[in-house]
Amino acid sequence: MKNKEIKDIALKYFTIHGYEGASLSQIAEEVGMKKQSLYAHFKGKDDLFLQVLHDAKETELTSKLDYLSKLDIHDPRKDLLGYLQLVIDMFQKNEQLKFWLRVSFFPPQHLADAIDREVIDTEERIQAVLESKFQEWIDSKMIRQDTAIIPTLAFLGVVDSLMLELAYGNDQKRLIDKVNASWTVFWRGISQP
């Protein structure tokens, strides 16, 4: 239980202050222990940070894969718009995912390679599932394409645009306008005439 409590507090500090601004002393104090006692649970700040990162990655993957596993081939428009809404909700309301978003765009330099590997692994796993869904929609003539990779990558481009706006912007209207414009162009490109 103590590991989870420490990671929960560390998540708050890493999200608000970044890696550099988060202090092990402050984390330990908020948990109710001395800084030295943290080393019984974690090797150091890097280890704690990477474990918090891993938990955030698993939260994102689980949420997205769970959503995608429930889709059928009958309404790709509704399902894809639902996925975009899921992304918005996840990254606006979940502290782990706010942290994940922040560190994927602004990694501590000495951990950048490890973070990049985690982000790329996540993206590749999501892309594989999305590509299979797009193939199902193509096969059932629900969307117009010859190969699943093109709409998959285009859709991930819409998601990336959304993520960029979530990372850098606080303007809800701009976020919605950007999503609506990207979505409109994307959907026109794949929908049946």
Image (tube, grey):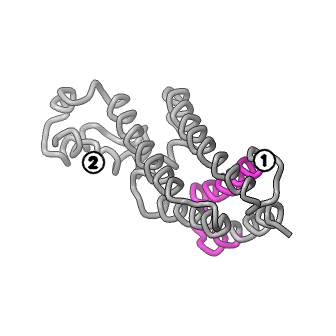
Segment colored magenta:
150-177
**Type of amino acid under label 1:** Ile
Q: Nearer the viewer, residue 23 or 177?
A: 177
Q: Which mark is residue 9?
A: 2
The numbered mark, 2 or 1, whose residue comes first in the sequence reads 2
Which quadrant of the structure image shows residue 32? top left
Q: Nearer the viewer, residue 176 or 106?
A: 176
Q: Is residue 26 magenta?
A: no
Residue 37 location (% of width, % of height): 15, 31
Q: Residue at x 58, y 60 (%)?
A: 72
Relative to 177, residue 28 above or below: above
User: Do the residues bearing badges 2 and 1 touch, measured as CB atoms within 8 Å?
Assistant: no
Q: CA distance from mark 2 to mark 1?
A: 41 Å
Furthest toward the right, the residue is 193
Residue 144 location (% of width, % of height): 81, 59
Q: Which residue is mark 1?
A: 150
**Type of amino acid under label 2:** Ile
Q: Which mark is residue 87?
A: none
